[in-house]
Amino acid sequence: MKTIFKVLGIALLVMFVISIFGMIFIEEQQPQETEVVKEVKKVEKVEKVEAVKYDEVTKKKIKNEIFTEFKKLYSELNKFKKSEEFTTNGFAGKQREWLKKVRKLGNNPDSKLLLEDRIVVGELSAIAIQYMQSNGKGTESSKFLEKEMRKAIQAYKK
């Protein structure tokens, strides 16, 4: 009888040790939040800020200011998109500042007002990248985006 209790005791002890190691192993296997995940969560918190509501006069004024800046950046894109300096160096050259301005404008919550007129600020950098990658020739996609952008700019009512 003592032998049965010894075997049973040893078996329980082994199962206890195995379960402890199992819990430790499972705990270690759970993915830890990476720095990227933490940054995304920070951005998501910032993006949840409610949109500001403007009266029509203020909205129109702000929208026109955003549109003017957008049009200026589009004009600058048309000046450099086929240049050898841009197709060779891309945004590592003079156009780095241009890209910063596009991103800043795109991150401005008021830039979403242009969506009402089918104008997407982010398309500027998309077009530029396509010109850079195609050595200044553009792609079917960039040509389509530019055609739509020109239509939207012409149709824009101040």
Image (cartoon, rainbow, N blue to C red):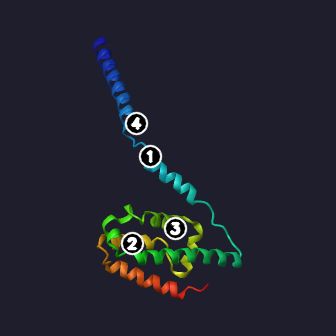
Q: Residues within 10 Å of mark 2 (few under 14, many from 20)?
A: many
**Disc 2 target residue:** 128
User: Tag 4: residue type?
Assistant: Glu
Q: Position of residue 107 (x, y in %)?
A: 53, 64
Compute the Cα span from label 4 to label 1: 20 Å
Is 141 in front, or is 12? 141
Circle 2 or circle 3, nearest the eye: 2
Circle 3 or circle 4, nearest the eye: 3
User: Tag 2: residue type?
Assistant: Ala
Query: Helix or strand or loop: what does disc 3 sit on?
Result: helix
Compute the Cα span from label 3 to label 1: 24 Å
Query: Helix or strand or loop: what does disc 4 sit on?
Result: helix
Compute the Cα span from label 2 to label 3: 15 Å
What's the mark number on residue 106? 3
Compute the Cα span from label 3 to label 4: 42 Å
**Disc 4 target residue:** 27
Circle 4 or circle 1, nearest the eye: 1
As drawn, is 63 to the left or to the right of 139?
right
What's the mark number on residue 35? 1
What's the mark number on residue 21? none
Marks 1 and 4: in contact by CB < 8 Å?
Answer: no
User: Tag 1: residue type?
Assistant: Glu
Is 33 in front, or is 139? 139
Compute the Cα span from label 4 to label 2: 47 Å
Q: Earlier in the sequence, mark 2 or mark 1?
A: 1
User: Tag 3: residue type?
Assistant: Gly
Q: Quadrant of residue 132?
A: bottom left
